[in-house]
Amino acid sequence: MKERAQKKVVALGGAVQFGLLAAALADIYQRPAEQIRGGKLPWTLASFANFVGPLSYFFFGRKRVSPRHQHPGRHRAG
């Protein structure tokens, strides 16, 4: 039973790691380069470091953008 629980924990960790990697890569390539500290290529490479890379990108790699400046082509009605 202990071995089965260990396999589940490893599978869950792998799924979380893959999800973080996919989210980081998607964000890197959808976000304009001006909104990323240090450039897209270094953060792409760093994202492949287990857990640390994607989390570092989300905490340190993205510049904070005010909601007003996120979508310059969109305006609120009213």
Image (tube, rainbow, N blue to C red):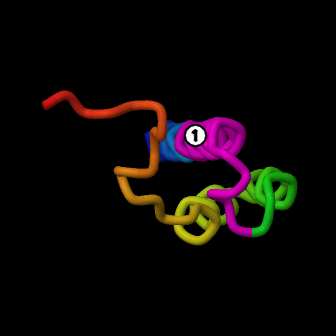
In which quadrant of the rendered view does residue 25 lie? top right
Magenta-colored stretch includes residue 5: no
Q: How far across and down, in percent of the image, does residue 7 sit?
A: 56, 39
Q: How far across and down, in percent of the image, does residue 19 sit?
A: 56, 38
Q: How far across and down, in percent of the image, does residue 29 sit?
A: 71, 38
Of the 4 image quadrants, the one containing the C terminus is top left
In this orientation, which residue lies closer to the viewer: 4 or 57? 57
Of the 4 image quadrants, the one containing the N terminus is top left
In this orientation, which residue lies closer to the viewer: 49 or 28? 28
Label count reads 1
**Residue 60 vs residue 53: left or right?**
left
Q: Is residue 28 above or below residue 38?
A: above
- Residue appearing at x 24%, y 33% in the figure: 76
- Residue appearing at x 35%, y 51% in the figure: 67
In this orientation, which residue lies closer to the viewer: 70 or 15? 70
- Whether residue 3 appears in this view of the structure is no
Q: How far across and down, in percent of the image, does residue 56 sit?
A: 62, 67
Label 1 crowd bin: few (<14), some (14–19), many (20+), radius 10 Å: some
Q: Mark 1 is on which residue type?
A: Ala
Q: Which residue is mark 1?
A: 23
Q: Is residue 35 above or below residue 29?
A: below
Residue at the left extreme, as displayed:
78
Q: Is residue 12 above or below residue 50?
A: above
Give the extent of the magenta segment: 15-37
- Residue appearing at x 50%, y 46% in the figure: 9
Residue at the front extreme, as displayed:
78
User: Magenta region's main secondary structure?
Assistant: helix
- Residue appearing at x 32%, y 33% in the figure: 75
**Residue 73 vs residue 47: left or right?**
left
In which quadrant of the rendered view does residue 46 lie? bottom right
**Residue 53 vs residue 55: left or right?**
right
